[in-house]
Amino acid sequence: MSRLTPVLKLNTVNRFAGTGMVITVIAVSGLLSLLVGAVLHLVLDAPAEAVAAGLRHNQVLYWWPGIALLIHAAQVIGTSTPLALALGATRRSMWWGSVVTFVLLALLAAAVLTAFLLVEGATGGWFLGLPAFDVALFAAGSPARAFLVAFLLYLGAQMVGAVFATVYVRGGPVALTLSIIGTVVTTLAVLVWVAATAPGSGAAAGTGATGFPEGLVLLLAAAAPVLLALLGWGLYRRVSVR
């Protein structure tokens, strides 16, 4: 662990780009959703139940923090690699120190989201009956579920960004473009396959939104960052500083 400490310090030297960014983007994402809901309910006089149902399926908390963390992870690998290696860090310590950084940021993001969720529950939906953070994928009313799912989602986003950045550092823009195209095509193919083979609508107890058992979905979600970390290390171990 001592070999990873300098990398952790290097990756977190800009606190706003790390911890500050995580707290800000999650807070702003949720509060923007709450603002939209409040306008619909209080200004446009939409029924609170209908607005709350819509907010529980909004995707702001998936995409904005996820994309922000993905970009941050890509910048960590892309900009810190030359400096870290020039300062004497090994490729192994740089990669795995960065992975530890991503895990810590994902834990922070999950903790911040869960804290907002608890406040939301204690205030009855910010005194308006509107759920800004209790979205269906994350929470469904459960802080423990919110923490776990948010951690896996935000860690996965960072690992995707780190792998793409490694592809760029190692192979340049052409390799990056081809890898992005391949990822998009593969993702679309998987989504089509899931939609075609999902056993039901997911309404049954114990099943996720895809209709597959929720435990299986969470297991696959937990395995994804591990596989991405190993894939990234396989690529990163041979990068050269250019």
Image: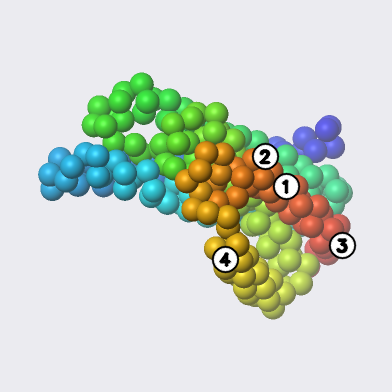
Task: Locate residue 122 relative to residue 177 in the image: left or right.
Answer: left
> Callout 1: few (<14), some (14-19), or many (20+) C-alpha neighbours within 10 Å?
few
Q: Nearer the viewer, mark 2 or mark 4?
A: 4
From the top left corner, tell me how far across and down residue 71 is, in percent.
57, 56
- Callout 1 amino acid: Ala
Task: Locate residue 211 relative to residue 237 in the image: left or right.
Answer: left
At mark 1, the secondary structure is helix
Residue at x 52%, y 39% (from the top left corner): 205
Q: Is the residue 186 above or below the residue 200 in the image?
A: below
- Callout 4 amino acid: Ala
> Callout 4: few (<14), some (14-19), or many (20+) C-alpha neighbours within 10 Å?
few
CA separation in Å, label 3 and label 4: 40 Å
From the top left corner, tell me how far across and down residue 174 is, in percent.
69, 78
Verify CB contact (< 8 Å) between mark 1 and mark 3.
no
- Whichever of labels 1 and 2 marks the residue nearer the N terminus, that label is 2
Q: Which mark is residue 103?
A: 2
Task: Locate residue 86 relative to residue 49 in the image: left or right.
Answer: right
- Callout 3 amino acid: Arg
Q: Which residue is mark 1?
A: 223
Residue at x 60%, y 43% (from the top left corner): 214
Q: Quadrant of residue 9?
A: top right
Q: Quadrant of the N terminus?
A: top right
CA separation in Å, label 3 and label 2: 23 Å
Q: Which mark is residue 238?
A: 3
Q: Which residue is mark 4?
A: 196
Verify CB contact (< 8 Å) between mark 1 and mark 2.
no
